[in-house]
Image (cartoon, rainbow, N blue to C red):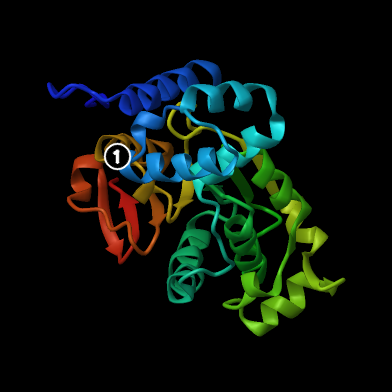
Amino acid sequence: MTEWGTSKAPRSAEDEDFARFVADIRKATSIDLSQYKETQMRRRLTTLRLKHGFLDFASYFKALMSDNRLHNEFLDRMTINVSEFWRNPNRWQVLKDKFLPAMLKNNPRLSIWSAACSTGEEPYTIAMILDSLRALDASSVLATDIDDGVLAKAKAGVYLERSLRDVPPEFVRNYFREADGAYHVSDRLKKAVRFQKQNLLLDRFGDNYDLIVCRNVMIYFTEEAKQDLYRRFAQALKPGGLLFVGSTEQIFSPGQYGLETSETFFYRRSV
Protein backbone atom coordinates (compact mmCIF):
# COMPACT_ATOMS: atom_id res chain seq x y z
CA MET A 1 0.00 0.00 0.00
CA THR A 2 1.24 3.48 -0.82
CA GLU A 3 1.85 5.49 2.33
CA TRP A 4 0.51 9.00 2.59
CA GLY A 5 3.08 11.70 2.02
CA THR A 6 5.74 9.55 0.29
CA SER A 7 5.85 11.72 -2.85
CA LYS A 8 9.05 13.65 -3.55
CA ALA A 9 7.37 17.03 -3.22
CA PRO A 10 8.12 18.64 0.16
CA ARG A 11 5.27 18.39 2.63
CA SER A 12 3.78 21.45 4.25
CA ALA A 13 3.55 21.88 8.01
CA GLU A 14 -0.16 21.04 7.73
CA ASP A 15 0.65 17.82 5.87
CA GLU A 16 3.21 16.87 8.51
CA ASP A 17 0.70 17.62 11.26
CA PHE A 18 -1.95 15.39 9.70
CA ALA A 19 0.53 12.58 8.92
CA ARG A 20 1.65 12.61 12.54
CA PHE A 21 -2.01 12.47 13.63
CA VAL A 22 -2.59 9.39 11.43
CA ALA A 23 0.46 7.68 12.97
CA ASP A 24 -0.55 8.60 16.52
CA ILE A 25 -4.12 7.35 16.02
CA ARG A 26 -2.82 4.05 14.70
CA LYS A 27 -0.51 3.57 17.70
CA ALA A 28 -3.18 4.54 20.23
CA THR A 29 -6.24 2.82 18.76
CA SER A 30 -5.09 0.40 16.01
CA ILE A 31 -7.31 2.36 13.60
CA ASP A 32 -5.38 2.82 10.36
CA LEU A 33 -6.64 6.01 8.73
CA SER A 34 -4.21 5.52 5.84
CA GLN A 35 -6.54 2.82 4.50
CA TYR A 36 -9.34 5.36 4.08
CA LYS A 37 -9.50 7.73 1.12
CA GLU A 38 -7.32 10.61 2.27
CA THR A 39 -9.13 13.57 0.74
CA GLN A 40 -12.52 12.64 2.20
CA MET A 41 -11.16 11.60 5.57
CA ARG A 42 -8.93 14.63 6.02
CA ARG A 43 -11.71 17.03 5.05
CA ARG A 44 -14.15 15.50 7.54
CA LEU A 45 -11.64 15.42 10.38
CA THR A 46 -10.43 18.98 9.69
CA THR A 47 -14.03 20.21 9.90
CA LEU A 48 -14.45 18.34 13.19
CA ARG A 49 -11.18 19.67 14.62
CA LEU A 50 -12.00 23.28 13.76
CA LYS A 51 -15.50 22.89 15.18
CA HIS A 52 -13.92 22.39 18.61
CA GLY A 53 -11.38 25.18 18.19
CA PHE A 54 -8.18 23.11 17.88
CA LEU A 55 -5.54 24.88 15.81
CA ASP A 56 -3.76 21.70 14.70
CA PHE A 57 -4.14 17.93 14.74
CA ALA A 58 -1.48 17.54 17.43
CA SER A 59 -3.62 19.36 20.00
CA TYR A 60 -6.75 17.62 18.73
CA PHE A 61 -5.13 14.22 19.23
CA LYS A 62 -4.22 15.02 22.85
CA ALA A 63 -7.82 16.01 23.52
CA LEU A 64 -9.16 12.82 21.89
CA MET A 65 -7.06 10.72 24.21
CA SER A 66 -8.44 12.37 27.34
CA ASP A 67 -12.05 13.17 26.41
CA ASN A 68 -14.34 10.21 25.78
CA ARG A 69 -17.00 12.43 24.22
CA LEU A 70 -14.56 13.76 21.62
CA HIS A 71 -13.26 10.26 20.97
CA ASN A 72 -16.73 8.89 20.25
CA GLU A 73 -17.51 11.85 18.02
CA PHE A 74 -14.29 11.17 16.12
CA LEU A 75 -15.38 7.56 15.52
CA ASP A 76 -18.82 8.68 14.38
CA ARG A 77 -17.34 11.12 11.88
CA MET A 78 -14.79 8.63 10.65
CA THR A 79 -17.29 5.86 9.97
CA ILE A 80 -20.20 8.01 8.65
CA ASN A 81 -22.99 6.14 10.36
CA VAL A 82 -25.89 6.56 7.95
CA SER A 83 -28.25 3.62 7.74
CA GLU A 84 -31.89 2.73 7.14
CA PHE A 85 -34.02 -0.39 7.29
CA TRP A 86 -34.48 -2.08 3.91
CA ARG A 87 -32.14 0.40 2.22
CA ASN A 88 -32.51 -0.17 -1.56
CA PRO A 89 -35.61 -2.31 -0.93
CA ASN A 90 -35.61 -4.13 -4.28
CA ARG A 91 -32.26 -5.73 -3.39
CA TRP A 92 -33.58 -6.89 -0.01
CA GLN A 93 -36.61 -8.31 -1.80
CA VAL A 94 -34.29 -10.37 -4.00
CA LEU A 95 -32.55 -11.67 -0.87
CA LYS A 96 -35.91 -12.53 0.72
CA ASP A 97 -37.60 -14.09 -2.30
CA LYS A 98 -34.68 -15.75 -4.10
CA PHE A 99 -31.45 -16.29 -2.21
CA LEU A 100 -32.51 -17.05 1.36
CA PRO A 101 -35.21 -19.60 0.39
CA ALA A 102 -32.66 -21.39 -1.81
CA MET A 103 -30.14 -21.44 1.05
CA LEU A 104 -32.72 -22.73 3.50
CA LYS A 105 -33.59 -25.67 1.26
CA ASN A 106 -30.03 -26.92 1.70
CA ASN A 107 -29.43 -25.78 5.28
CA PRO A 108 -32.07 -24.66 7.81
CA ARG A 109 -29.38 -23.25 10.15
CA LEU A 110 -27.85 -20.25 8.44
CA SER A 111 -24.84 -18.35 9.74
CA ILE A 112 -25.01 -14.65 8.78
CA TRP A 113 -22.67 -11.72 9.42
CA SER A 114 -23.63 -8.05 9.08
CA ALA A 115 -20.24 -6.30 8.84
CA ALA A 116 -19.94 -2.59 9.69
CA CYS A 117 -23.54 -2.70 10.92
CA SER A 118 -23.71 0.90 12.15
CA THR A 119 -26.79 1.54 14.31
CA GLY A 120 -28.35 -1.85 13.62
CA GLU A 121 -30.89 -1.28 10.86
CA GLU A 122 -29.19 -3.78 8.56
CA PRO A 123 -28.95 -6.81 10.92
CA TYR A 124 -32.48 -6.17 12.18
CA THR A 125 -33.66 -6.17 8.56
CA ILE A 126 -31.95 -9.53 8.11
CA ALA A 127 -33.56 -10.85 11.30
CA MET A 128 -37.09 -9.82 10.33
CA ILE A 129 -36.69 -11.40 6.88
CA LEU A 130 -35.43 -14.62 8.46
CA ASP A 131 -38.37 -14.60 10.86
CA SER A 132 -40.83 -14.11 8.00
CA LEU A 133 -39.28 -17.24 6.45
CA ARG A 134 -39.57 -19.08 9.79
CA ALA A 135 -35.80 -19.45 9.93
CA LEU A 136 -34.79 -17.00 12.65
CA ASP A 137 -34.76 -19.40 15.61
CA ALA A 138 -32.42 -21.83 13.91
CA SER A 139 -30.10 -19.20 12.40
CA SER A 140 -27.36 -17.00 13.89
CA VAL A 141 -26.94 -13.31 13.07
CA LEU A 142 -23.69 -11.57 14.06
CA ALA A 143 -23.47 -7.77 13.68
CA THR A 144 -20.17 -5.92 14.09
CA ASP A 145 -18.92 -2.34 14.05
CA ILE A 146 -15.85 -0.44 15.22
CA ASP A 147 -17.84 2.24 17.07
CA ASP A 148 -19.02 1.56 20.63
CA GLY A 149 -21.51 4.42 20.39
CA VAL A 150 -23.39 3.05 17.41
CA LEU A 151 -23.32 -0.47 18.86
CA ALA A 152 -25.03 0.85 21.98
CA LYS A 153 -27.72 2.46 19.83
CA ALA A 154 -28.14 -0.75 17.87
CA LYS A 155 -28.59 -2.81 21.02
CA ALA A 156 -31.19 -0.30 22.29
CA GLY A 157 -33.15 -0.72 19.05
CA VAL A 158 -34.98 2.63 19.09
CA TYR A 159 -35.41 4.52 15.80
CA LEU A 160 -37.05 7.58 14.30
CA GLU A 161 -39.83 7.14 11.78
CA ARG A 162 -37.65 8.21 8.85
CA SER A 163 -35.46 5.11 9.32
CA LEU A 164 -38.50 2.93 8.59
CA ARG A 165 -39.67 4.60 5.40
CA ASP A 166 -38.81 1.59 3.19
CA VAL A 167 -40.02 -1.12 5.57
CA PRO A 168 -43.09 -2.99 4.23
CA PRO A 169 -46.16 -2.12 6.35
CA GLU A 170 -46.68 -5.69 7.57
CA PHE A 171 -43.10 -5.77 8.87
CA VAL A 172 -43.62 -2.48 10.72
CA ARG A 173 -46.71 -3.97 12.39
CA ASN A 174 -44.98 -7.23 13.27
CA TYR A 175 -41.58 -6.04 14.44
CA PHE A 176 -41.91 -2.51 15.85
CA ARG A 177 -43.72 -0.85 18.72
CA GLU A 178 -44.41 2.88 18.52
CA ALA A 179 -43.89 4.78 21.77
CA ASP A 180 -42.83 8.31 22.74
CA GLY A 181 -42.46 9.42 19.14
CA ALA A 182 -40.08 6.59 18.22
CA TYR A 183 -40.19 3.02 16.96
CA HIS A 184 -38.84 0.22 19.18
CA VAL A 185 -37.58 -3.02 17.65
CA SER A 186 -39.32 -6.10 19.03
CA ASP A 187 -37.55 -8.06 21.74
CA ARG A 188 -37.68 -11.09 19.47
CA LEU A 189 -35.37 -9.43 16.95
CA LYS A 190 -33.12 -7.92 19.62
CA LYS A 191 -32.54 -11.34 21.17
CA ALA A 192 -31.72 -12.84 17.79
CA VAL A 193 -28.89 -10.44 16.84
CA ARG A 194 -25.50 -10.62 18.56
CA PHE A 195 -23.65 -7.29 18.44
CA GLN A 196 -19.87 -7.20 18.77
CA LYS A 197 -17.08 -4.65 18.35
CA GLN A 198 -14.74 -5.24 15.42
CA ASN A 199 -12.19 -3.35 13.35
CA LEU A 200 -12.69 -4.65 9.80
CA LEU A 201 -9.24 -3.54 8.71
CA LEU A 202 -7.40 -5.21 11.58
CA ASP A 203 -9.33 -7.94 13.39
CA ARG A 204 -9.63 -11.55 12.29
CA PHE A 205 -12.80 -12.68 10.53
CA GLY A 206 -14.87 -15.72 11.37
CA ASP A 207 -15.52 -18.36 8.76
CA ASN A 208 -18.15 -20.65 7.24
CA TYR A 209 -20.74 -17.89 6.82
CA ASP A 210 -23.66 -18.57 4.51
CA LEU A 211 -24.19 -14.84 3.99
CA ILE A 212 -22.08 -11.74 4.63
CA VAL A 213 -23.76 -8.35 4.27
CA CYS A 214 -21.44 -5.33 4.03
CA ARG A 215 -23.11 -2.37 2.35
CA ASN A 216 -22.21 1.28 1.72
CA VAL A 217 -18.95 1.06 3.67
CA MET A 218 -16.29 0.07 1.15
CA ILE A 219 -16.60 3.39 -0.70
CA TYR A 220 -14.65 5.08 2.12
CA PHE A 221 -11.59 2.81 1.78
CA THR A 222 -8.62 2.95 -0.56
CA GLU A 223 -8.52 0.53 -3.49
CA GLU A 224 -5.84 -1.52 -1.74
CA ALA A 225 -7.91 -1.83 1.43
CA LYS A 226 -11.02 -2.78 -0.55
CA GLN A 227 -9.20 -5.49 -2.45
CA ASP A 228 -7.88 -6.98 0.78
CA LEU A 229 -11.34 -6.92 2.37
CA TYR A 230 -13.00 -8.58 -0.62
CA ARG A 231 -10.45 -11.42 -0.43
CA ARG A 232 -11.03 -11.82 3.29
CA PHE A 233 -14.81 -11.74 2.91
CA ALA A 234 -14.60 -14.45 0.24
CA GLN A 235 -12.43 -16.60 2.51
CA ALA A 236 -14.90 -16.13 5.38
CA LEU A 237 -17.78 -17.53 3.30
CA LYS A 238 -18.65 -21.17 2.91
CA PRO A 239 -18.13 -22.44 -0.63
CA GLY A 240 -21.28 -21.23 -2.39
CA GLY A 241 -21.88 -18.58 0.31
CA LEU A 242 -23.09 -15.12 -0.65
CA LEU A 243 -21.65 -11.60 -0.24
CA PHE A 244 -24.22 -8.78 -0.44
CA VAL A 245 -22.74 -5.29 -1.05
CA GLY A 246 -24.13 -1.77 -1.40
CA SER A 247 -25.63 -0.06 -4.42
CA THR A 248 -22.45 1.94 -5.13
CA GLU A 249 -20.06 -0.97 -4.58
CA GLN A 250 -20.20 -3.21 -7.61
CA ILE A 251 -17.20 -5.54 -7.66
CA PHE A 252 -15.36 -5.57 -10.97
CA SER A 253 -13.51 -8.79 -11.83
CA PRO A 254 -14.87 -10.70 -8.81
CA GLY A 255 -13.02 -13.82 -9.93
CA GLN A 256 -9.74 -12.41 -8.59
CA TYR A 257 -11.21 -12.74 -5.09
CA GLY A 258 -12.69 -16.19 -5.59
CA LEU A 259 -16.17 -14.77 -6.17
CA GLU A 260 -18.64 -14.87 -9.04
CA THR A 261 -21.59 -12.60 -9.78
CA SER A 262 -24.98 -14.10 -8.85
CA GLU A 263 -27.06 -10.98 -9.41
CA THR A 264 -26.50 -7.21 -9.16
CA PHE A 265 -24.67 -6.57 -5.86
CA PHE A 266 -24.71 -10.27 -4.90
CA TYR A 267 -21.52 -12.32 -5.22
CA ARG A 268 -21.12 -16.02 -4.55
CA ARG A 269 -17.97 -17.72 -3.34
CA SER A 270 -16.78 -20.13 -5.99
CA VAL A 271 -17.35 -23.77 -5.10
The residue to which callout 1 is attached is 222
Q: Position of residue 23 (x, y in %)?
A: 41, 19
- In this rendering, the answer to whether 246 lies above or below 169 is above
Left or right, 64 with respect to 184, comes to left
Q: Is residue 134 visible to us here?
A: yes
Residue, far left: 8
Q: Residue at image x 82%, y 59%?
A: 187
Residue type, numbered disc 1: Thr
Q: Is residue 62 above or below residue 116?
A: above
Q: Position of residue 206 (x, y in %)?
A: 50, 33
Residue 235 position, x and y percent, is: 36, 36
Name, please, the residue furthest toward the bottom. 169
Q: Residues within 10 Å of mark 1 (few under 14, many from 20)?
A: some
State which quarter of the image contains the C terminus. Answer: top left
Identify the residue at horizontal 53%, vertical 54% (top origin). 107
x and y, in percent, of residue 163 in the image: 63, 69
